[in-house]
Amino acid sequence: METFFAVLKFIGIILEVILIFNLLIIVHELGHFFAAKWRGLHIEGFGIWFGKPIWQKRIGGVLYSLGSIPAGGFVKLPQLMDSAIEGQGEFAAKDLPKLKPLDKIIVAFAGPLFSFLLAATFAVIVWQVGRPVAEGERTTTIGYVQPDSPAAKAGLKAGDDIQRIDGHGVKRWAGQAQDAIQWSIVGSEEEKITLDVKREGKMETIPVTPIVEPTKWYQRKGLKQIGIAAASHPMVASIVKDSAAEKAGFQPNDVLVRVGGEPIYGDASVGDWIKAHPGEPIVITVERGAKKAAGTYPSVDLAFEPRGFTVGEVYPGSPAQVAGLKKGDRVLSVDGRVMPYGVAFPPYVWEREGKEVTLSIERGAETKELKVTPEIPVEVEGTAKPKPSIGILMERSDGLVFDQRGRTSPIYPHPGEQLSQAANQIFETVKKLSPTSKSGIGIQQLGGPVMMMRIYYMLFENPDNWRLVLWFSVIINVNLALMNMLPIPPLDGSHITLALVELIRGRPPGARTAKVVEYVQIAGTFLVIGTMLFITMFDVQDLFGGGKKEKEKPPMRFRERAAAVKSS
């Protein structure tokens, strides 16, 4: 039954994606249609969807149709079919009255105008219903620093509040603007990224040398990164039955804010505190319930007594696999030492290369001991000098299952703010695509229709689906409006540009010029189609795992073993 409802949900989301995708395109085409009606152009046909018509009817000389392929819509305007690449309809343009340049401009401009008006409509709705924003999107505080990353080597720490990057101020973590931390890092023009951070009330300037992860020639090129994540208080999604979390009294929707009186910046904060305070009682403060009038939340202190850690994964050919350790096993102690949350386990193993250690594990209702000998892996993803390991992935939550979104709250941005931010995203992207830019952002980092529909699918999966979809549609429609204004055939901007030239010259182009224009239109059309196919190739790779092999190489690889793996 679960599978049946999952399939129904999948089908429902797909239908929602098709609905919103078609709406954006059809509204754009309606702009051309209504403007053509207004200016008296001959309209051969207006259709919703493509393919073999399910329904069609001629009304007032216009053939209206509903196609069988749900991929947008079209309006046939033979008087604007200036190039061979656009083909010929029922009437050739030469058999119809020539259009005035102003009519061409109005009809061509109406498509982008309607896209912009749809964006404005959505922006007004978002202004009223609100856009849910995760805590991590709005912060400027670092919540996690990846070990051995450029940020860690430079000395950045969780809790550092980033004030400026490369000299310009930042106000938020996410977003595609100069005041966003993520964009400022990936789009940095400098070899060393300079971060001005506030730490314990004092300002510090920390230069960081970013890295770019290598990729295959057929994959998107990596972008600059330094190995930091935004601060976000973990929010409990559910509690595992009979776990330490249940015994402590955690409840769904609890938000972890402090451990031992110190602030929590992310999932790793609890483990870091336990590591720094071995043997001390673990008291976690959670916020629970509705926000008070003063803007604060009620809080509760919970005594947490985690029992070791859980094995999240056992890597093939590892000492752990040879010893018989399994995914889901709970490691209670190591050589008789209790290790709450498992924070002391990696350093303990690092010092015992080639020395046997005894793990006391709990597997279901059974408790048993396993002996395992740590060794240095042959290869560890992202690490040049691997340390001794038994080859497992640890899960330290001990019954706490976190909501990956964290705590969200609505914001109500003014429509003008939404539209300007959407336009700014496009200008920022164009700036980074410039040949003089040293950011490393290229055309292959752009997204096409496949990526757009993939994002829509993910947004529809979210509990706040339609509010997020409306907000994202503001961005997409402004993008559609501005990109169509580019003077590149077959975009609307090319028709406007040619009409402006004709208007300024006071006469249509001669036969020779018209032929040159036609060749330019054909070349431009192939350029646009080729670019979209190029981008779509990467979008499809992302859809199916980034172009990686079906069987990925494990992140940790050990020497080959002749001995058989022990049975458990």
Image (spheres, helix red, strand yellow):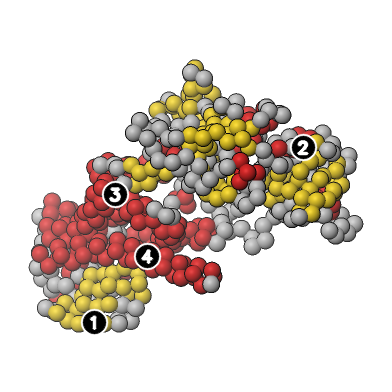
C-alpha separation, residue under disc 2 versus residue under disc 4: 51 Å
Q: Amino acid at mark 2?
A: Val
C-alpha separation, residue under disc 1 versus residue under disc 2: 75 Å
Where residue 455 appears, as percent x and y from the top left, is 43, 56
Name the N-terminal-most of marks 1 and 4: 4
Verify CB contact (< 8 Å) between mark 2 and mark 3.
no
Nearer to us: label 1 or label 4: 4
C-alpha separation, residue under disc 4 versus residue under disc 3: 19 Å
Nearer to us: label 4 or label 3: 3
C-alpha separation, residue under disc 1 versus residue under disc 4: 25 Å
Q: Amino acid at mark 1?
A: Gln
Q: Judge by depth and name the residue closer to the eye, 70 or 308.
A: 308
C-alpha separation, residue under disc 2 versus residue under disc 3: 50 Å
Where residue 418 appears, as percent x and y from the top left, is 29, 44
Verify CB contact (< 8 Å) between mark 1 and mark 2.
no
C-alpha separation, residue under disc 3 versus residue under disc 1: 38 Å
- Name the residue located 76 percent from the left edge and 45 percent from the top edge: 331
Verify CB contact (< 8 Å) between mark 2 and mark 4.
no
State the residue position of label 3.
129
Dot 2: what SS? strand
Dot 1: what SS? strand
Quarter holding the C terminus? Answer: bottom right
Give the residue furthest to the top: 202
Name the N-terminal-most of marks 2 and 3: 3
Residue 221 visible: no
State the residue position of label 4.
16
Where residue 84 appears, as percent x and y from the top left, is 29, 70
- Name the residue located 74 percent from the left edge and 55 percent from the top edge: 364
State the residue position of label 2.
338
State the residue position of label 1.
56
Nearer to us: label 2 or label 3: 2
Mark 4 is surrounded, within 10 Å at the Cα level, by few (under 14), some (14 to 19) or many (20 or more) other residues, namely some
